[in-house]
Image (spheres, rainbow, N blue to C red):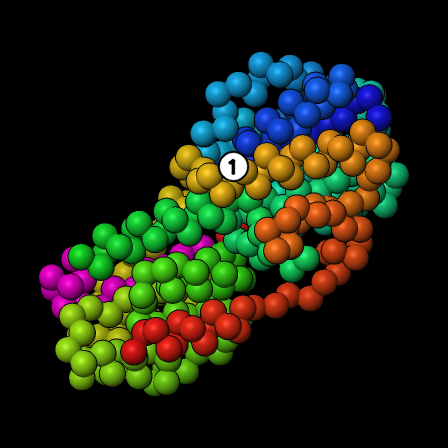
C-alpha cells in the first residue's frame, strides 16, 4: 500500500498521540503517504481528511488527548455510514486505515474490514477492557493519575479518621479499580464483575480495620457498580464513620502519558504500518506477555472477557 489513513475514535486516551506519531513517522520512513482523519469515523464519513507530514507529529508525544480529535459517530453505526466512509476514504486515495480506539471503535474497524477496506486496529482506551490484549493505550497513565489522587485523599482520610469512597472510570470493567485499589492499599474494591454484598464486602473490611486501629477506610468504587450517594449514606448510618465521596471522572482521561503508554503506543503504531505496507489488513494489535502482536480482527474481538481473579484475591489478602 502507498496511502494509508489514521484516525482516533471513542473516548480519548493518553498515548494516542504517540501512536499517531508512530504511524506517521513509520509511513514516512517507507515513503508512504498518510492521511489524517479528524474526529474519528465522523471525519471519515464526511471527508474531514488531510495529508500529514512528519512535522505534523512533532512535539505531540507528551500531550494527552489526541491531535486528530475524536468523536462517537452515530452515522457510522449504520451500514450506510460505513459504506459512505469507505467511498470517502477511496476518494482521498486511502487504501488501508489504522483505527486507534476502544472496544466500540475496534468493532467499527471490523465493519470497515467486512465492507472491503483493509483496516488495522490499535487498542486505545483507559479502561483496559478488551479481552484479546493484556494492555490498551492510556491505561497506565489513567491508573497512575488515579493512584496520585487516592494517595492525597488518604492523607486527609487519616487526619479525620474518615471513610472515603473514590469512584473511578472503567465503564463496565473493574480493571482500573482493581489496579488502583491494590496500588493504594484500599480496604475495599468494588467492581462490576463481582456481585457486591454490603455486609461481607464493605462492612466486613471496615469493622475489621476498626478493630485493628486503622485510621482510614479507602473504598475504590468502579463505575458501573452502584450510585456513590446511596453507598455513602449506608456506610455512615451502619458504621457511624463519617464518609465522603470523590468522583475522579475525566481527570483520569487527561494528562501527559507515562513511559509505558508512550512506548507501547509507539510500538503499536509502527507495527500497524508494517502490516498495511505489506498489504495486510483485517488485523488488530495487542500485547501478550509484554510483546506486541497481531491477531485476526474477527477472532480477537470475539474473545470472552476475563477478570484477573489473582488480583482480586491479592487485594483481599493485603487489605487486612
Ligand atoms: O471508555 C473510556 C471512558 O472514559 C469510560 O471509562 C467511561 O465510561 C466513558 O469513557 C465515558 O464516556 P464519555 O466520554 O462519552 O462521557
Residue 14 is one of the magenta-drawn residues: no
Horizontally, is 45 left or right of 67 in the view? right
Q: Give percent across and percent down for residue 303.
A: 72, 63
Q: Quadrant for the N terminus, please.
A: top right
- Residue drawn where x is 25% and y is 64% of the image: 164
Q: Give percent across and percent down for residue 123.
A: 63, 46
- State how many labels appear: 1
Horizontally, is 32 left or right of 263 in the view? right
Residue 157 is one of the magenta-drawn residues: yes
* 292 relative to 219, above or below: above
Horizontally, is 280 left or right of 316 in the view? right
Could you tell me which secondary element the residue under label 1 belongs to? Answer: helix
Q: Using the image as rendered, state which of residue 161 and residue 308 is in the foreground.
A: 308
**Which residue is label 1 attached to?**
262
Q: Using the image as rendered, state which of residue 69 and residue 135 is in the foreground.
A: 135
* 145 relative to 240, above or below: above
* 230 relative to 301, above or below: below
Q: Using the image as rendered, state which of residue 11 and residue 18 is in the foreground.
A: 18
The magenta region covers 156-169
Q: Quadrant of residue 243?
A: bottom left
* 291 relative to 166, above or below: above
Amino acid at each position: 500500500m502507498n496511502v494509508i489513513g489514521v484516525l482516533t475514535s471513542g473516548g480519548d486516551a493518553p498515548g494516542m498521540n504517540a501512536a499517531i506519531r508512530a504511524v506517521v513517522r513509520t509511513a514516512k520512513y517507507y515513503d508512504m503517504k498518510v492521511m489524517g482523519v479528524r474526529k474519528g469515523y465522523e471525519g471519515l464519513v464526511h471527508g474531514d481528511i488531510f495529508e500529514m507530514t512528519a512535522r505534523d507529529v512533532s512535539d505531540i508525544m507528551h500531550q494527552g488527548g489526541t491531535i486528530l480529535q475524536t468523536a462517537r459517530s452515530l452515522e457510522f453505526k449504520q451500514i450506510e455510514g460505513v459504506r459512505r466512509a469507505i467511498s470517502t476514504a477511496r476518494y482521498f486515495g486511502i487504501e488501508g486505515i489504522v483505527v486507534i480506539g476502544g472496544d466500540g471503535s475496534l468493532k467499527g474497524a471490523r465493519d470497515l474490514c467486512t465492507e472491503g477496506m483493509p483496516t488495522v486496529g490499535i487498542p486505545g482506551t483507559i479502561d483496559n477492557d478488551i479481552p484479546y490484549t493484556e494492555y490498551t493505550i492510556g491505561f497506565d497513565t489513567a491508573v497512575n493519575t488515579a493512584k496520585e489522587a487516592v494517595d492525597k485523599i488518604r492523607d486527609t482520610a487519616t487526619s479525620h479518621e474518615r471513610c472515603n469512597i473514590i469512584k473511578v472510570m472503567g465503564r463496565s470493567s473493574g480493571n482500573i479499580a482493581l489496579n488502583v485499589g491494590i496500588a493504594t492499599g484500599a480496604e475495599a474494591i468494588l467492581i462490576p464483575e463481582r456481585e457486591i454484598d454490603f455486609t461481607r464486602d464493605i462492612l466486613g473490611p471496615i469493622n475489621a480495620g476498626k478493630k485493628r486501629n486503622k485510621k482510614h477506610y479507602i473504598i475504590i468504587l468502579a463505575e458501573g457498580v452502584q450510585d456513590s450517594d446511596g453507598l455513602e449514606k449506608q456506610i455512615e448510618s451502619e458504621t457511624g464513620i463519617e464518609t465522603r465521596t470523590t468522583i475522579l471522572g475525566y481527570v483520569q482521561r487527561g494528562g501527559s502519558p507515562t513511559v509505558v503508554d508512550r512506548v507501547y503506543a509507539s510500538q503499536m503504531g509502527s507495527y500497524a504500518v508494517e502490516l498495511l505496507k505489506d498489504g495486510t489488513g483485517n488485523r488488530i494489535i495487542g500485547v501478550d506477555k509484554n510483546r506486541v502482536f497481531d491477531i485476526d480482527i474477527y477472532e480477537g474481538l470475539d474473545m470472552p472477557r476475563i477478570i484477573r481473579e489473582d488480583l482480586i484475591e491479592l487485594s483481599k489478602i493485603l487489605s487486612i
